[in-house]
Amino acid sequence: MKKVAVVISLLVVFFGVQSDACVGKLLHIGVLNSSEGKVLSEMLASLITERTGTTVSVVYYKSTQELYDAMQGKQVDIAIENTARAMKLLNQPAETDPKKAYEFVKAAYEKEKGMIWLKPFGFTGNSGTTSRSYTATILRVDILNNFPVLPRVINKLGGMIDDESYARLIKSAEGGEKPKTVARDFLKSKKLI
C-alpha cells in the first residue's frame, strides 16, 4: 500500500511540474484568415489554455508569406499548415499520397526552417488546393524549451477530425456560428476539455 502511495505521489508531482511549465506564459498562434484557420486556431487555443494554463493569442494573416515571415521573426510560435501548400513552399511537385507528403515536409521543415510538424488533424480535405493533403500544427523548434509539454497536448488532436467532422465544423463557422464556439463544442464532444 505504501508503494502505491509513493508511486501516485510521484506521478502527481511529475505531471504537476510538467503542466506548470506553461502556466503564466504567452503563445501566439498565426493562421491564414479563413474559416478553416479560425476554427482550427480556436480549437488549439482552447485546448492549450485548458490543458496548460497558458495564455494564447490568435493572429490572422492575409498571405502565407506574411505568416511565415512572422514565424521566422518569432512573432508567431504556432501555425497551421497543410502538406500541399508546404510542398509548394518547398518548391516540390505535388504529392498525391498525403502520408508521403507529410513525411517529406515534416523532415524538410525541421531541417530547413527550424519548424516541427505535429500529428495531422486527420482530415484530408483539399483546403483550396488541387490535391488531397493533411493539415497539421507546426511550431518553432525553439519554443520547445519554454513549452516542453506543448507537443503532447496538441497531439491529442491528431487524427481526431475526419473529413465529415471537418465539413460540419466549417459549415457551422460559415453559417454564422462563432469559430470559438464551434471549436469548444467539438473539443467537449471529444472530451478533450
Image (cartoon, grey):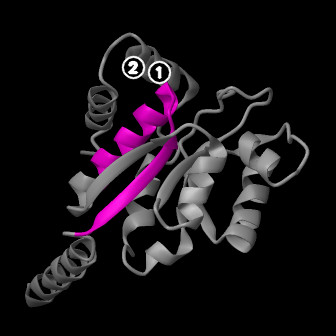
- Of 16 and 23, the residue lying toward us: 23
Residue 184 is drawn in which quadrant?
top left
Is residue 138 toward the left or the right of residue 3 in the image? right
Q: Quadrant of the C terminus?
A: top left
Residue situated furthest top in the rendering: 175
On the image, the x and y values in percent for residue 155 come to 46, 55
From this view, report whether residue 160 is shown above or below residue 181: below
**Is 89 displayed left or right of 144 in the figure?**
right
Q: Residue placed at 39% from the left, 10% from the top? A: 175
- Where's residue 42, x and y in %? 35, 39
Q: Is 10 colored magenta in this rendering? A: no
Label 2 crowd bin: few (<14), some (14–19), many (20+), radius 10 Å? some
**Residue type, label 2:** Ala
Quadrant where the N terminus sits is: bottom left
Q: Secondary structure at mark 2?
A: helix
Range covered by the magenta-colored residues: 25-48
Dot 1 falls on a residue whose secondary structure is helix
- Examine the rendered structure and indicate whether residue 38 appears above or below residue 69: above
Most foreground residue, 191 or 20: 20
Q: Residue at x 39, y 57 (%)?
A: 28
Q: Which residue is located at x 68 percent, y 26 percent?
A: 128
Residue 38 x/y as whole percent: 42, 33
Q: Which residue is disc 2 drawn over?
A: 173
What type is the residue that disc 1 sits on? Ile
The crowding category of the residue bearing disc 1, from other C-alpha atoms within 10 Å (few below 14, some 14 to 19, many at least 20), is: many
Q: Is residue 46 left or right of residue 36?
A: left
Q: Are marks 1 and 2 in contact (CB under 8 Å)?
A: yes
Residue 27 is a magenta residue: yes
The residue that mark 1 highlights is 170
